[in-house]
Amino acid sequence: MAELTLTPNIDGGDDFYAELIGAHEGLSREESEAYNARLLLVLANHIGDRDVLKAAIDAAKRKD
């Protein structure tokens, strides 16, 4: 099983965050939620590894 990376791993993480927030500008709540769902599916498709995706689902459920 591939291991899920949970430590910071994005070059220019602050810039990425700003781009992500900027992508939501001008969207209604419903549009923003739909955008998030589409983005999640695009990224999940790119990852492609079901074990990694399951680990991500489980990690996102945790509140610690």
Image (cartoon, rainbow, N blue to C red):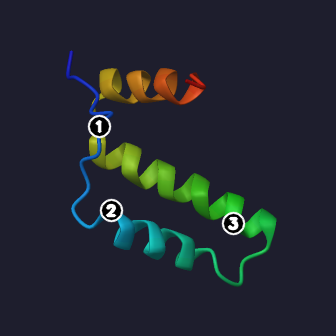
How far is mark 3 from mark 2, CA to CA?
21 Å
State which mark lies toward you, 3 or 2. 2
Three-letter amino acid code at disc 2?
Answer: Gly
Three-letter amino acid code at disc 3?
Answer: Ser
Q: Position of residue 25 (x, y in %)?
A: 65, 81
- The quadrant where residue 27 appears: bottom right
What residue did someone put label 1 on? 7
- The quadrant where residue 52 appears: top left
Q: Residues within 10 Å of mark 2 (few under 14, many from 20)?
A: few
Q: Position of residue 53 (x, y in %)?
A: 39, 30
Q: Residues within 10 Å of mark 3 (few under 14, many from 20)?
A: some
Q: Is residue 58 left or right of residue 16?
A: right
The N terminus: image quadrant? top left
Q: Position of residue 6 (x, y in %)?
A: 33, 33
| N-terminal-most mark, 3 or 1 | 1
Comparing 64 with 37, the one in front is 64
Q: How many marks?
A: 3
State which mark lies toward you, 3 or 1. 1
Check the image and report above or below for 43 versus 15: above
Q: Position of residue 40 (x, y in %)?
A: 49, 50
Q: Residue at x 29, y 49 (%)?
A: 46
**Direction top: furthest residue:** 1
What residue did someone put label 3 on? 32
Q: What label does residue 13 carry, if any?
A: 2
**Direction bottom: furthest residue:** 26
Check the image and report above or below for 42 versus 23: above
Check the image and report above or below for 37 versus 12: above
How far is mark 3 from mark 1, CA to CA?
26 Å
